[in-house]
Amino acid sequence: MKANVTYWLDQTAQRLPDKTAFADERKAVTFGELRTQAMAIATQILAKGLFKKPVVVYLEKGVDVLVSFMGAAYSCNFYSPIDIDMPASRVNKILEVLQPSLVITTAELSEAFRQYAYEGEYLLFEEVSCAAVDEEAVEAARCRGIDTDLLYVLFTSGSTGVPKGVTINHRAVIDYIDWVTETFEITEKDSFGNQAPFYFDNSILDIYSTIKSGATTYIIPKNLFAQPVPLLEYLQEKKINTIFWVPSALIVVAKLKAFRNVDLSGTLQRVLFCGEVMPNKQLNTWRKFLPDVLYANLYGPTEITDACTYYIVDREFADEEPLPIGRPMANTDILVLNDKNEPVTGDEIGELCVRGTSLSMGYYNNPQKTKEAFVPNPLNPYVPETIYRTGDLVKYNEYGEIIYLSRKDFQIKHMGHRIELGEIETAVSSLEEIALCCCLYDEKRQKIVLFIEAQLDKAYINERISGLVPEYMLPGKVIALPKMPINANGKIDRVKLKELL
Ligand code: AMP
């Protein structure tokens, strides 16, 4: 039994050494090069005596990030990417949780990294990726590793302002990618067009399906997502036949009806999406222009290795109908529990909970948050068994498919990004002029709305908090109130605020 995802790379590099594995705007690596460079990095990591330790990857999005990920995996350590555009205070919070002793970066980026609260070691990508490989040392480390050792930690928004590090082990990714490649019949003939940032778990599907099957992934330049026609031309030029994007990216293309200018009918075969609600209105535009494509709605949080349910679109939907999130993937069980922790019946609404191999092992270095979300299965009092409570409210339709309804809490999805409104409130509250504030999401206008009890405007607030939260969390509208409405419990009255949207 292979307990490490890098065994896939060994096999593919042997089978297809000269085939392009990943390509970005500036460079490409073949499977052979990917393996050699990753092994070189692994050799250097092991030379530092690290085993099962966090390795931060601080690089611009591109091929080098993936080489570094594989380097960490070969050495039986686990990677955690940090976005180079992330505000310093958030990077510091992540470093505090992770306590890494190694970062892979470039000489140039290491200058920026030195401003953070980090005293560990540096590996410079340009030096280590071409260093000598010690196959024996790497193999010895891999043999000591087991499949429940961590592969990566991805940080998501945390309501208290401290990002949560979702831990995922090798087995979970192996399980998920086996399912993906079998279900969608991914082979070396396929080409992915990657949209997801590598700190977002949708990218797992592109990365590991490619490594396992010998497909090719093109990392699409980010700026193309604001220009639908050049974006589709890019897909055509690179002969990309499979995309797995957040609905927001698909919606932009649909709204501008970019298909009128570029005919992808002979190229695109699979359009997969995950991460937020995909409205049928926009999906219907895609389906009208590209009727022969396979469309699939995948659903799941980072805590369950990208996705846990799926629906392959197999019938017509009216624009206003919800698109099902479908049924559980293989080797995954979904429990929909009501307020009494009992399975729902009929079309009763309940919280979607997940059981299975692909469950995260918890939030890194955060037992409190782990205990809240990863709980004992209330339906199995006989042996300890963990389920993950997603916080998503769902129900079954007449076909036995799951329909996503809403969230139980204040987590939102904005342009594909997972955001805890509490994280924005924590940042705003830290400003001395602010006594009370509250954030709501205006679903209709797709705007984060901030209410404050202070006479300050959006430009001022956003400038002040831009060093605390990522750009995508900045409020799109600020409403200054003379007095914040308070409910009978003495809390900010969110219902009243909603009426002001
Ligand atoms: P993330 O951890 O960033 O993948 O975000 C997970 C959350 O995104 C889930 O808990 C849902 O609230 C939402 N989500 C993911 N996929 C879907 C989907 N297909 N339809 C509706 N909501 C989704």
Image: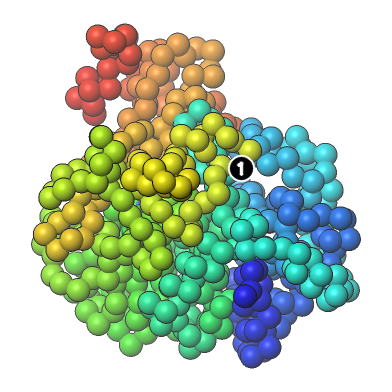
Q: Residue at x 33, y 87 (%)?
A: 266
Judging depth in this view, the residue of 196 and 133 nearest the camera is 133
User: In the picture, which quadrant includes the N terminus?
Assistant: bottom right
237 to 83, vertically: above or below = below
29 to 379, vertically: above or below = below
Dot 1 lies on which element? loop
Amino acid type of the residue that numbered disc 1 sits on in the rendered structure: Tyr
Q: How is the image coloured?
A: rainbow
Judging depth in this view, the residue of 85 and 351 nearest the camera is 351
Q: Residue at x 34, y 34 (%)?
A: 409
Is 64 left or right of 487, judged from the image as shown? Answer: right
Q: Which residue is mark 1?
A: 364
**Percent x, y of residue 284:** 19, 67
Q: Residue at x 68, y 56 (%)?
A: 78
Q: Residue at x 41, y 46 (%)?
A: 382
**Percent x, y of residue 192:** 47, 75
The residue sitting at the front extreme is: 382
163 to 43, vertically: above or below = above
**Percent x, y of residue 391:** 35, 41
